Image (cartoon, rainbow, N blue to C red):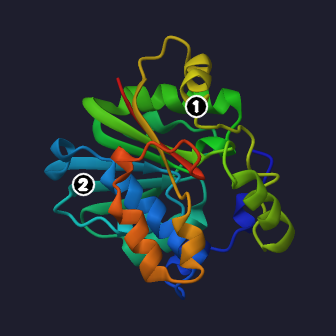
């Protein structure tokens, strides 16, 4: 990976989540909430487990009670972020581990996970890294398990937002996003990357259409907009984030 992710302060996005109401806080919180709502109910329970790859500071798993998943693992290539996550969100049922950036997950974890999440991860990888990661995920996924992937939708206002972030924010994406996807070509592009790998897209939608922008004016109103129509029933392909669910 060419971008030095260790330059991002430990807990950076977690601090955004715990900060004042506004567009940035809503963006991240709504993303995590959308992922949770996209997990089938039969995969939630005291006997189920979840693996969050690219967990960063642990914010997503920190939202999940043990009643949803009694065993939770977050992994990331950044030891500093893992240390932050462990200190703030680590419990007996939720652990965080760092792994080398050669993405050898299968050497670290044995057994099958009911749910694996890739939240804003695959766009940070090149083609070879995506193939390697998805191959390992296929090995780690329970036969009835689900992989949840989110990634920016380049068939939306996201390119404009990315341009503005790159020019006016202290965090920039122009060096981070190596592989870009849009709603219409997500599935064929992933299938082309993974070849005969047994991963199939069973559901796809978008989130973050108007509600994040409303959050700049009214956080409460944005929350009402985002939850009125569940993501599973949202058919607009132009939301800024693609939310997809995959099975073996």
Residue 195: image tag: none
Depicted 61 relative to depicted 11: above or below? above
Q: Helix, strand, or loop for circle 1?
A: helix
Percent across and percent down for residue 42 are 16, 42
Q: Residues within 10 Å of mark 2 (few under 14, many from 20)?
A: many
How far apart, in angstroms, are the residues tagged by discs 1 and 2?
Answer: 30 Å
Q: Which residue is mark 2?
A: 71
Q: Quadrant of the N terminus?
A: top right
Name the residue rendered at 58%, 62% in the picture. Answer: 79
Name the residue rendered at 59%, 75% in the picture. Answer: 23
* Frontmost residue, 1 versus 172: 172
The nearer-to-camera label among 1 and 2 is 1
Q: Return the disc, 1 or 2, that comes first in the chain's sequence.
A: 2
Percent across and percent down for residue 21 are 52, 85
Name the residue rendered at 55%, 13% in the picture. Answer: 195
Q: Which residue is mark 1?
A: 186
Relative to 69, is 181 on the left or the right?
right
Percent across and percent down for residue 144 are 24, 29
């Amino acid at each position: 990976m060419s971008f030095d992710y260790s330059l991002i302060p430990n807990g950076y996005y977690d601090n955004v989540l715990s900060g004042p109401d506004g567009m940035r806080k809503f963006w991240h919180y709504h993303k995590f909430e959308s992922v949770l709502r996209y997990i089938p109910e039969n995969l939630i329970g005291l006997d189920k487990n979840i693996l969050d790859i690219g967990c960063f500071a642990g914010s997503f798993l920190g939202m999940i009670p043990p009643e949803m998943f009694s065993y939770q693992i977050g992994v990331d290539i950044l030891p500093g972020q893992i240390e932050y996550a462990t200190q703030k969100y680590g419990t007996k049922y939720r652990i965080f581990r760092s792994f080398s950036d050669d993405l050898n997950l299968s050497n670290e974890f044995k057994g099958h996970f009911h749910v694996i999440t890739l939240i804003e991860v695959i766009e940070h990888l090149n083609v070879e890294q995506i193939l390697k990661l998805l191959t390992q995920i296929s090995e780690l996924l329970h036969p009835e398990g689900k992989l949840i992937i989110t990634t920016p939708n380049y068939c939306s206002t996201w390119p404009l937002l990315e341009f503005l972030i790159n020019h006016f924010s202290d965090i920039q994406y122009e060096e981070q996003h190596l592989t870009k996807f849009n709603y219409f070509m997500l599935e064929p592009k992933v299938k082309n990357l993974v070849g005969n790998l047994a991963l199939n897209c069973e559901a796809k939608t978008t989130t973050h259409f108007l509600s994040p922008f409303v959050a700049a004016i009214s956080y409460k109103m944005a929350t009402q907009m985002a939850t009125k129509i569940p993501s599973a029933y949202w058919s607009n392909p132009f939301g800024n984030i693609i939310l997809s669910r995959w099975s073996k």
